[in-house]
Image: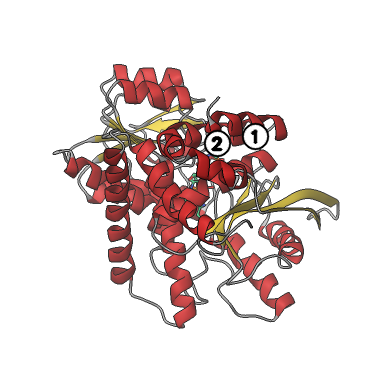
Amino acid sequence: MSYASEVYDRVVAKNPSEPEFHQAVKEVLNTLSVVIDAHEEEYREMALLERLTEPERIIAFRVPWVDDHGKVQVNKGYRVQFNSAIGPYKGGLRFHPSVNQGILKFLGFEQIFKNSLTGLPIGGGKGGSDFDPKGKSDNEVMHFCQSFMTELCKYIGADQDVPAGDIGVGGREIGYLYGQYKRIKGLYEGVLTGKGLTWGGSLIRTQATGYGLVYILDEMLKQNNNTLAGKNVCISGSGNVAIYACEKCQQLGAKVISLSDSNGYVYDAKGIQLDIVKDIKEVRRGRIKEYVKAVPTAEYTEGRGVWNIKCDIALPCATQNELQLEDAKALVANGCKVVAEGANMPTTIEATDYLQKNNVMFMPGKAANAGGVATSALEMAQNSQRLSWTAQEVDAKLKQIMIDIYAKTADAAKRYNMENNYVAGANIAGFEKVVDAMKAQGIV
Ligand code: NDP
Ligand code: 2IT
């Protein structure tokens, strides 16, 4: 049995009930087999893959807080500090009722390779809680965030572990978390990214994941003698990533015809009006179905099904495993030629295989959505310098980072004779840098 298969079986046996983690490890190890086989003896001797798939540390804690009715609520809190070979742990915090240790381990594992691909000195981590911010008052969100940080602050720091946002964690939550960190530790330091612009945040961080997704998409199209202009783009989700992916697609001349949330999706044949979406989502924290009240010519459909819309390009920007085999079949049948993942692992392994076999250009999340964390690292750099760069400077750096990620990904795939297999390319390029650092640092 190959070393990669042995390690995968061990991961499944040692981490039961963590299917998303198994899935993320499987995808990476499968595509890395060419590299692993070539170094099998060396990697086995230092138990490289066993160490790579075992988090350095997992912190799990109780988060008690009092709701607006005076009732005590208790949530679970976590931080998975997965790998610090190339820099301090870096990765978002997710607040969503589905959060559990296995989901955060999948996200932390992906983050190792994604952060490596950015070319910046950041290790992999992820955290969060099963707290549901939906329907909570600002006061409740603040009390929850303060309790969460009261425990988390013992384990993080500007040179140690730097959390940021993810699903359910945006500017409001980062503000409350930062205030409590500062109050307890007495340190005004860059311990979180995604901060507000008046207190250490970076311009363009809000837009960065969505913009970065479209920069790498644009580069991939250019390198394949194609262009974004005039294309119909189907986007899922209507949160931070979806909104700014939509904005950049429109700026580059594409037409975005859908957005969704966990209740349903909107189809606007004339092109999504983003100012209306921003008002619903960013200002009023409402639901995407409200879009059709403002735009009666658009259609709202309850439930899944956004991938049944005919499009040229699909950008899944909501959550893991939202694009399944039947969705991939519908996309291919409708002539979709390109999928780029804004979310983390939104496409199942079966759906990815189907898309690749049917010649759909497929850019995986760890390359395609790396612009968010890359700009977080730029925020860390600005905090260290005690300077803030202009929007143009940050945007230009973000764009160059995404172009470089495309080049590294395409090059790694080519070196191993898997041209245009960007899944393999991203995993290989991300892995190479981490392995080099792990080898140099000994058995730790
Ligand atoms: P937001 O919380 O801003 O938005 C999430 C969106 O996805 C909402 O529209 C939400 O709908 C939808 N969604 C969440 N869970 C589900 C679900 N189970 N089923 C259907 N729809 C769902 O999060 P982000 O936009 O920040 O994150 C979206 C994705 O991008 C995630 O996979 C995240 O890990 C990834 N990502 C985010 C980065 C960032 O910088 N923010 C960076 C890199 C990746 P609803 O409101 O109904 O819950
Ligand atoms: O999945 C991700 O890369 C993020 N949620 C962003 C992490 C970060 O530290 O900015």
Numbered label attached to residue 25: 2
Q: Amino acid at mark 2?
A: Val
Mark-to-mark CA distance, 2 and 1: 8 Å
In this orientation, which residue lies closer to the viewer: 155 or 215?
155
Q: Position of residue 267 (x, y in %)?
A: 36, 31
Q: Is residue 8 above or below residue 41?
A: above
Residue 143 in sight = yes
Query: Would you identify the image quadrant in which residue 417 lies?
Result: top left
Category of crowding for the residue at label 1, using alpha-carbon neighbours closer than 10 angstroms: few (below 14), some (14–19), many (at least 20): some
**Horizontal side, residue 16 vs residue 249: left or right:** right
What quarter of the picture does the C terminus occupy? bottom right
Residue 133 percent across, percent down from the top left: 65, 49
**Residue 171 versus residue 135 in the image, above or below:** below
Amino acid on which disc 1 is placed: Val
Q: Is residue 259 visible?
A: no
Q: Nearer the viewer, residue 405 or 314?
A: 405
Q: Which residue is mark 1?
A: 11
Q: Quadrant of residue 223?
A: top left
Marks 2 & 1, CB-CB < 8 Å contact: yes
> Which element carries disc 2, helix, strand or loop?
helix
Residue 362: name its quadrant. top left
